[in-house]
Image (spheres, rainbow, N blue to C red):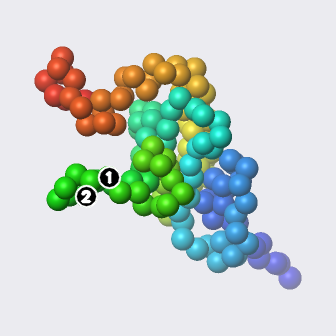
Amino acid sequence: PTSIPPPSPPFSCYLLDAVGEECADGARANNCLPVVAAMLNPELELSFDCIDVQHVLAERHWYVSGYTMSFHEPHGDELHLLFKDTSEQTSMFRIVVKASLTRALAGDLVLSIERTVDFLLTVGEGYKQMHSAAKTGKRHPSTNGVVC
């Protein structure tokens, strides 16, 4: 009799494994919510954040959502933190793993993340200066208010 091989783990587990994180056993077995959320280690005191990672990955044709852990109240512009143990600069990113993501594409995403981090480590403060206007909402006078 021929045995049917067990299903392979979801690609969200592959992505977690690639960055050295554990995938919950239930996720491997049940193919649950295909989302990977991560943040850069704040103890490393990097010169870039998850929003910078989002921008560079977009240049590599990957859309990964970067978020800060704070928001401005719409009727008063008061800043609120989403969590008590974070600062307004704390950021994270999220990857939604769609059904169309193949193993080859997941591998390309991991490689793109590695190359993105290497690039950001190399350019350091230079990238932060290029995109500081975009992150603060301040408009650059030489671009007619358009910030990339």
Label drawn at residue 124: none
Residue situated in front as seen by the camera: 44 or 5? 44
- For label 1, the residue is 79
Residue 45 placed where, x, y %?
60, 34
> Which is nearer the N-term, disc 2 or disc 1?
2
Number of labels in the image equals 2
Residue 70 placed where, x, y %?
39, 54
Say what amino acid the circle numbered 1 marks. Leu
Q: Residues within 10 Å of mark 2 (few under 14, many from 20)?
A: few
- For label 2, the residue is 73
Residue 91 makes an appearance in the image? no
- Residue in the picture at 69% in, 76% down: 26
Residue situated in front as seen by the camera: 88 or 52? 88
- Residue in the picture at 43% in, 26% down: 128
Q: Quadrant of the N terminus?
A: bottom right
Residue 95 placed where, x, y %?
50, 54
Q: CA distance from mark 2 to mark 1?
A: 6 Å
| Relative horizontal placement of residue 18, taking residue 82 as reference (left or right) | right
| Up/down of 46 relative to 50, above or below | above
Q: Furthest residue to the left?
A: 144
Q: Quadrant of the C terminus?
A: top left
Residue 12 makes an appearance in the image? yes
| Relative horizontal placement of residue 40, taking residue 135 as reference (left or right) | right
- Residue in the picture at 57% in, 39% down: 113
Q: Residues within 10 Å of mark 1 (few under 14, many from 20)?
A: few
Say what amino acid the circle numbered 2 marks. Glu
Q: Are marks 2 and 1 in contact (CB under 8 Å)?
A: yes
| Up/down of 89 relative to 94, above or below | above
